[in-house]
Amino acid sequence: MTTEAPDMPTFADLGLAETLVSRLASLGYETPTPIQARAIPTLLEGKDVVGLAQTGTGKTAAFALPILQKIDPSNSKTQAIVLAPTRELALQVCEAITTYAVNIPGIRVLPVYGGQGYGFQLSGLQKGAHIVVGTPGRVIDHLERGSLDLTALEFLVLDEADEMLNMGFAEDVERILADTPEYKQVALFSATMPKMIRGLAKKYLHDPVDIATPKATTSTTTVRQRWIQVSHHHKLDALTRLLEVETGDGMLVFVRTKSSTEELADKLRSRGYSAAALNGDLVQAQRERTVSQLKSGAIDIIVATDVAARGLDVERITHVVNYDIPHDTEAYVHRIGRTGRAGRTGEAILFVTPRERRMLSAIEKVSGRPVEEMSVPSAEEVNERRAGRFAQAITSSMGSLQFHAFRTLVEEYSSENDVSMTDVAAALAVMSQTDKEFFLRPDPPKAAPRARDFEPRPKPAGYERSDRLPAEGAAVYRVAVGKRHKVGPSAIVGALANEGSLKRSDFGKITIGQDHTLVELPADLPDAVFEALANTRISGKLIDLQPDSGPPIRRTREDRNPQSAKRSGGPTSKKSHENRAYPSKAPETWEKKKPHEKTYEKKAPRTGDGPAGDSTRKPRHK
């Protein structure tokens, strides 16, 4: 019988309730990480905490578990709030807390962030959310609406506080803290501790306990790490091309959900690959059988979730593919650790959608070295490999015991039908194929340069887009929604930021017209932004982001009715553009012009979801 070493406590040793300990065990959590081992007991004692912890060290569980243990499910008021800098992190934290709370009946966790409609959030707040996880801008929106009541708040967490302040949320965070009760428990977690963070802690925390943990790094130094930018809809094609081109043995493909394991495994099998799913719904016997098949070579690909793959050690695994990027960078370390074991080399490939680019830098930090960029294998590369395998198959078949028997049959057929041996061989090759074409069709040529790459057409005489030119390095872009669609700056900034992975500093002046909106953005927006926004809608309408080149030519009343023009003495020629009128109604511009005008200058759009942040709000009147 062995006992735990004093420096390796279990979750039960930290003072957690049995319901939480058993839930962690079912998720495969064995021992707490350093941040968890130090923060959980401290928070359970009711003390404030300032945690210096890198991404991927398990800090979500460090604050979520004590909160869940101390929440009163019978009280429907909001008792805990977690502030996160981005929508992705808010959703990740919300999902984690919900996962930990499975064995606690009645707990309600609600994410609130910009870019999402208010309906769902208002409904959730009205029903009562014990724990709210949100981005600063949207949390303030709900406070101002009166839909979020923090009078019963007992716990407040600032997650990735340094990132929050870097994104310009210092005033928002202080505004939220000012609306909370004086006596509450506060936990502040940050990867760095600049002066501003220390000042915030000194002002709002009561005798906090400082907790620092070592930076998490991967011990897997024999794994080559690469990443591919690929849209969600093209992931399957990218994976199948990798399977054709990459040289290896067994492959482990990671996805986020149990249903995705079955779905992707089915699609791979339909394309001729030997694949199986591995998820938490499998009974132990099924799990063991699947792993045994991978070891023996009966199957070559396992599609798994993080939990299902814990402890998996199969020598045949040469490739780990992160089909879905992990939200927790610590999970990435565990994933790629399934290959390159015991001194062997391995390959780790990460699929990254345009909106997930920001997470790549966090993964590079936790892995301790850069991740190489690669391209999806081209049709030419795939065809070359197929031709090579075909030639190898011919060579191998010549050693078969049946080779001479078939050779005799082919010679007889060739002689009797006066057909060349080459034609017979080609016909036999066709017989061995399925209905699909053997060679891929060439990839389409790269798209022609976008409109922004050309000189804009001259502006009509007298047309001025605004009172000033765009800032240096910025350009004006046109979005196909405006006042008629009942949109404001917050909806536009939220959509562009969330879907296009734009940063807070990317936005300039916003001018809302009747049917369109003009937005100042960087002049050199990459193609990936346009691709990510291609299907984005606001109020149900495609935004159709395009570089702006002036208003469309519009016909005047005189152009449409020449007789009216004659009576009024106006121009009669429909071809004349010189005297065409343009709408006299000025577009709505968020820039303060005069003291009495009710328009505002956008000092800096507030963003907080996705890599860009949260939504823009109109400033409050004093």
Image (spheres, rainbow, N blue to C red):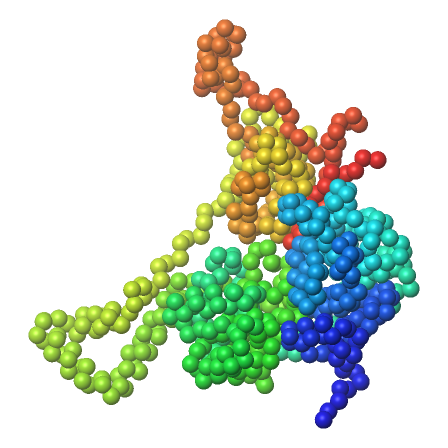
Q: Nearer the viewer, residue 17 or 369?
A: 17
Question: In this view of the protein, can residue 477 be seen by the observer?
Answer: yes
> Please, is residue 87 above or below residue 580 in the view?
below
Left/right placement of residue 420 relative to residue 363 reads: left
Q: Nearer the viewer, residue 58 or 591?
A: 58
Q: Looking at the image, which residue sits at the far bottom?
A: 1
> Please, is residue 191 above or below residue 297 in the view?
above
Q: To which quarter of the image does residue 310 belong?
A: bottom right
Q: Residue at x 47, y 58 (%)?
A: 234
Question: In this view of the protein, can residue 494 be seen by the observer?
Answer: no
Q: Position of residue 214 (x, y in %)?
A: 76, 74
Q: To which quarter of the image does residue 81 belong?
A: bottom right
Q: Residue at x 27, y 72 (%)?
A: 432
Q: To which quarter of the image does residue 615 belong?
A: top right
Quadrant including the N terminus:
bottom right
Q: Residue at x 55, y 26 (%)?
A: 460
Left/right placement of residue 418 relative to residue 79 reads: left
Q: Position of residue 359 (x, y in %)?
A: 64, 61
Q: Looking at the image, which residue sits at the far top?
A: 567
Q: Looking at the image, which residue sits at the far left?
A: 416
Left/right placement of residue 156 relative to residue 526 reads: right
> Please, is residue 358 above or below residue 121 in the view?
below
Q: Position of residue 436 (x, y in %)?
A: 32, 64
Q: Looking at the image, which residue sits at the far right?
A: 207
Q: Nearer the viewer, residue 547 or 287?
A: 287
Quadrant including the C terminus:
top right
Q: Position of residue 473 (x, y in %)?
A: 65, 44
